[in-house]
Image (spheres, grey):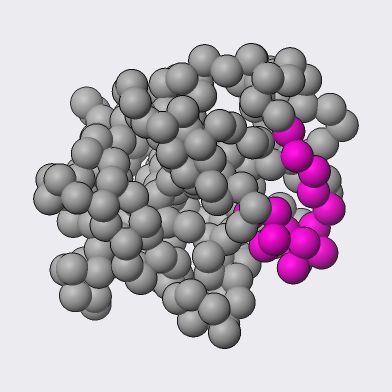
Amino acid sequence: MHVGVVKFPGGHCDRDVMYALNLLDIPSQWIWHKDTSIGNIDAVVLPGGFTYGDYDAVGQKAADAPIMGAIKSFASKNGPVLGICNGFQILCAAGLLPGKLMRNVQNRFQCADSRCIVERRTTLFTRGITNQKTLNIPIAHGFGQYTYSNIDDLEKNNQIVFRYDTENVQPSKNNLNSTNNIAGVCNKQGNIVGMMPHPERACESDRGSQSRDGQSIFLSLLV
């Protein structure tokens, strides 16, 4: 398994993703946003950050970057693609995932530990999660309110991958403004996943969230 991590202008979580992959001994390489080919890789990660400064519609400029044509082609052949936070926003803006991410209702950046219920375990990024019902993975976003015109379709097609746990966690620890508490979705095939929580920030128990639950997202690629 060889993973490509896309570098966009304004992205600031790409090195964290690369660090996490190296920590887990998963070979990785950079993919530049101006490239038109992803090269010989087996999976793609679009990391978080503020691509192009989020000056226009969030994720839209990155969705129009030259590399996205190659990523769309890769995804159409069942290639694994993961979008984290801003990467999730980009995948939605590019039409690779349904819905879009809106500004938080509180109109402020929200950063906290978060517990997410794993709703679908058959995607290429959750198939290694077997025993855990929830994952402790932090959030950090200003545009994390997921919305979609036909949520019933997502429910029917089993496209909701993660949902914020609103019963066992203080409300302030989760983004309760997302429709149906959605924290992550996938395409129908399950090879493209977008999630607002940051798994790369939950890979070492002595850092950040004190959780290693994020490892399971990346290690699922090896199953």
**x, y percent for residue 92:** 42, 28
Can residue 129 be seen here?
A: no
Residue 29 is a magenta residue: yes
| Quarter of the figure with the C terminus | bottom right
Give the total number of marks visible in the rendering. 0
| Quarter assignment of residue 151 | top left
Query: Residues in magenta?
Result: 17-31
Q: Residue at x 26, y 52 (%)?
A: 109
* 177 relative to 91 in the view: left or right: left
**x, y percent for residue 28:** 79, 48
Q: Residue at x 87, y 32 (%)?
A: 40
Observer-nearest of 19 and 127:
19
Q: Residue at x 54, y 78 (%)?
A: 207
Residue 26 is a magenta residue: yes
* 48 relative to 42 in the view: left or right: left
Q: Is 143 located above or below residue 212 in the figure?
A: above
